[in-house]
Image (cartoon, helix red, strand yellow):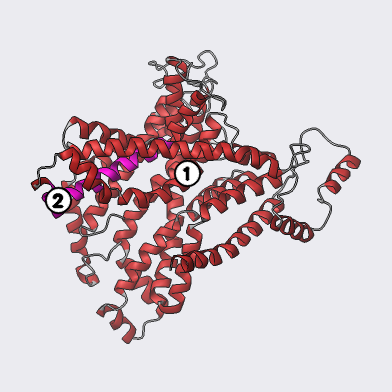
Amino acid sequence: MSELSTAVPSSQGVSLWDDAWARLKKNRLALLAATFLILEVLIFFLAPLIAPHSYEVQDLERTMTGPSWRHWFGTDTLGRDLFARVLYGGRVSLTVGILASMVSAIVGVIYGSISGFLGGRWDNLMMRVVDVLYALPFIFLVIILMVYFGRNFMLLFVALGLTQWLTMARIVRGQVLSLRHKEFIEAATVLGIQRKWIIFRHLIPNTLGPVIVYLTLTVPAVILEEAFLSYLGLGIQAPLASWGTLIKEGVDVMDLAPWMLFFPALFLSATLFSLNFLGDGLRDALDPKGAKD
Amino acid sequence: MRLTYLLKRLAVMIPVFFFVVTLVFFMIRFAPGGPFSSEKSVSPAILKNLEMKYHMDEPLVRQYLRYLKDLLKGDLGPSFKHANRTVNEIIAEALPVSVELGLLALMWALVIGITSGGLAALKPNSPFDYIPMTFSLLGICFPTFVVGPILVLIFGVWLEWLPVAGWDTWADRVLPSLTLGFAYAAYISRLTRGGLMEMRVQDFIRTARAKGLTETQILTQHALKGGLLPVISYLGPALAGIITGALVTETIFNIPGLGRFFIESAVNRDYTVVMGTALLFFAHLCL
């Protein structure tokens, strides 16, 4: 990630966002993706009002029926309404995705900004640690964690978040390195402001652009990882479901009830697709000169 | 230069490897449950004998040191669940399967990716461009565990062309490797197209065109060399991704590879097999 073209003093900071918004508005694909995501979030969180059936009530007379007026997306092997299950599954998947990304952002931003701000030997050491951690396949550790410590929700998103903070730390560190010799930081130092306040009040807010971009790209990565775990039977536990568990259930009976695979897979893919497009669009908007990654 | 770099890397990786060994070892030991806490109740006497056989009665630190000592000798210990089999034997059986699957997947990824990316770059903004690019977009958004089942449904269940599970004949290898390679084919296709498009405007390509070479000749003889650089630098991450992706692919297609053993033994709390397979994965990814 190269430095932002607009490393402006914070008094003019607004113009960066206006600029970015103007550029984003021109990117129709990114706007479409954003609209889709907002709609999706609304539908998911209003799920109890929208879904005509509960996600756990079984309609035993209609198990594995195809899409119909009564059950829009059909029913699953236990006669549960698939439409409701996809909505609630999306709620779980998105929640895990967003919370885990938040965890990764918090850890990454703090680590990266401290490393960049201290500079010199400390920076070197802290970045070597990141390099080494890059080589570890965290997903194996997460699998072991999930198996041995039970599949609780908290653990799931903390573990997933901890697999994703490394790139964030690198990005933020790069930003901070380029900012720390700017006049406004020197001014703050001269004024005798404590180091931790310089980091939190002056440096971190100025790295927000790239952080938001990368955050948008982390959410789909985490959703995918969660789905991967759930597919292996190590994620969310019944009666709750995520898209990963729904896809797994769908795969088991796909020759008899293809809709059980189709709808969750459709939603998962559309969401991943939109998040990736929005992320790309935001990157172009916030960092027009920026490098590809 | 190259040698010092390798040595440096190795010097960093050895402590990291030991850190991982230690972490995984204590993580799985401190977790509740054990390999012998199963549904059927075993009499205390038998349990005691079992624990003695596997040195489970010793203090944890002793067990850890014993494990390290054996590890240095290359011995990963006996399996807790597969009676009379050592982890080394299990790995010796499963590793070739996983390596074959991974290499086949990589081959698919390269062949499909470079051909479609090349075609797209040769005729930009034509159906040759749009169709592969749409596919590669799909490839990036559809995870392995969706692609795999869909391929099984189409080619295995509806058309009945290919077997849906197992690992005996060559036909068994087609669907799993294709599934695993699909996402990477998609990405490589985009990289190839991007790399080649960048080459098209270079001076030496203009010279080649001025010499009167056809577009195809320019592509294969001149542009590919430079245009494939991004693909080559992507091979490392791709291989790492394929190793992780194999976990799911092996589960979908019921292939007796390392990934399946890892998951199976993690669920069964077969400590030594989990350790052995996990360490093997770590070692692969570190290199």
Dominant secondary-structure state across the stretch colored magenta:
helix
**Residue A271 relative to residue B170: left or right:** left
Residue pictured at 38% horizontal, 40% vertical: B184
For badge 1, the amino acid type reads: Glu
- Judged from the image, the secondary structure of the residue bearing numbered disc 1 is helix
Check residue B202 for magenta coloring.
yes
Q: Against B92, is B282 above or below?
A: below
For badge 2, the amino acid type reads: Val
| Residue B47 badge | none
**Can you identify the residue that label 2 sits on?**
B201
Residue pictured at 28% horizontal, 35% vertical: B116
Q: Nearer the viewer, residue B55 or A217?
A: B55
Position of residue A190 measured from the top left corner of the image (x, y, whole percent): 32, 86
Q: Nearer the viewer, residue A287 or A201?
A: A287
Dot 1 and dot 2 within a common chain: no
Position of residue B14 measured from the top left corner of the image (x, y, whole percent): 59, 63
Q: Nearer the viewer, residue B149 or B16?
A: B16
- Determine crowd level at label 2: few under 14, some 14-19, many 20+ residues with C-alpha closer than 10 A: few
| Magenta region, residue range | B181-208
- Determine crowd level at label 1: few under 14, some 14-19, many 20+ residues with C-alpha closer than 10 A: many
Position of residue A93 measured from the top left corner of the image (x, y, whole percent): 45, 40
Give the mark toward the camera: 1 or 2.
Answer: 2
Residue pictured at 20% horizontal, 50% vertical: B198
Residue pictured at 75% horizontal, 60% vertical: B65
Check residue A108 for magenta coloring.
no
Q: CA distance from mark 1 to mark 2?
A: 39 Å
Identity of the residue furthest to the top in this view: A61
Q: Quadrant of the N terminus of chain B?
A: bottom left
**Can you identify the residue that label 1 sits on?**
A225
Mark count: 2
Q: Quadrant of residue B35?
A: top right
